[in-house]
Image (tube, rainbow, N blue to C red):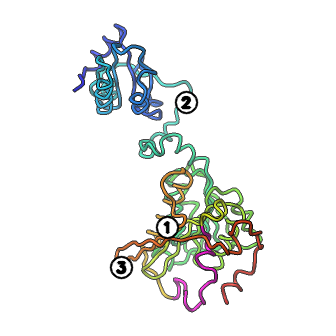
Amino acid sequence: MAKEITPREASFRIEQGALLVDVREEHERELGMAQGAIGVARAELEAAPHRFISERDTDVLLICQSGGRSMLAAEQLQRQGYPRVTSVRGGTVMWQAEGFPLTRPAGKVDEDFHERYSRHLRLPEIGARGQRRLETASVVVVGAGGLGSPAAFYLAAAGVGSLRLVDDDVVDRSNLQRQILHTDADTGVPKVDSAQTRLSALNPRVSIEGIAERLTSDNVERLIADADVVVDGGDNFPVRYLLNDACVHLGKPLVYGAVHRFEGQVSVFDAGRQRGRAPCYRCLFPEPPPPEAAPNCSEVGVLGVLPGVIGLLQATEAIKLLLHIGEPLAGRLLHFDALAMRFRETRLSPDPDCPLCAPGAPFPGYIDYAAFCAG
């Protein structure tokens, strides 16, 4: 087991020529390092210690936040043939508590960024680089209702830099059982205005744009052209087909969600960027069901928490797409049964004869989606 020494002992050893290495991640070191330390993330140091330690018998002191990671790194380096590696007990926390100085990088440190997103920054799959990527990303959420509410809440909380919400409806008291962006005092207020107020209060770093328009063939490209990801929070088939066609045409990933009574569905349709490899919505539903087979929530009701589950899953998929991590739901349809508390998955394949997304198929243009869905 590697040895531990106190910050005072470490300070003395540094004066004698010992090398002090801060093994925390870059975003942690930005908030201050023990004076005299060089910064090398633990994984990077363990992978190639020779890049940072010139001689194997160099006196090396490792420090982290509280002492745990530096001890593990010290033990790993000893196994690799570096016998004089020691961990600083209590890490940077104890170093500062005992009055030893910290140094910070030149320029102003964004304290709010580090504090607000600290749990993301600790994930190697995200880190500071991924969080900065989220801050430069743009997501369009169509619908500020049952699905759009939780999706937008979590996208704003996650730090997606630009959120555009598209919805032409106003808040009704019957919405409040599931549309958590709105409150009773918002009754009669445009949903995008209510949403903008809540989301800006949650995260003032995020740019929230509310568009009080009904999505149509005339405005769809204008509204989603600059989006990195589009989230379908609509509640009707004309909007789903329109969004699908526009996203295929413009090469945008579409995060689909739908709810009905006690059941919901989620998927990612990315045929615009992956023709012949990923399906589009029309591959799943070449034709809409008859209106009587697919009544909306106002006609048959919906369990209030169900859109929360599905909207949250949509936000998860959107964040994964923005960060290029994990396995998106492209080519998979996730079903959720709230009464049975059961998920199941259906594999989806692209339709080689799909008139919209088949390789080489020209864009057929937009149609009268209301008439198409009315049969």
Query: Which residue is disc 2 drawn over?
Result: 108
Return the residue at label 1.
311
Kindly give the residue lying farthest to the bottom in the view shown: 292
Residue 113's label in the rendered image is none
Kind of residue at badge 3: Leu
Q: Secondary structure at mark 3?
A: loop
**Residue type of the residue flagged with mark 1:** Gly
Q: Nearer the viewer, residue 83 or 157?
A: 83
**Residue 82's spot in the image, x, y percent?**
32, 19
Give how far across and how far down residue 34 sits, in percent: 39, 22
> Residue 80 vs residue 315: left or right?
left
* Residue 367 vertical placement versus 220 (above, below): below
Q: Tell me where residue 336 appears, x and y as whole percent.
A: 42, 74
Q: In the rendering, which numbered label is found on residue 339?
A: 3
Q: Nearer the viewer, residue 361 or 10?
A: 361
Find the magenta span and give its range: 279-299
Front residue of this view, candidates 164 and 363 = 363
**C-alpha gap between disc 2 and disc 1:** 37 Å
* Label 3 – label 2 distance at C-alpha: 52 Å
For mark 1, does the 10 Å Cα neighbourhood hold few (<14), some (14 to 19), or many (20 or more) residues?
A: many
Q: Which corner quadrant holds the C terminus?
A: bottom right
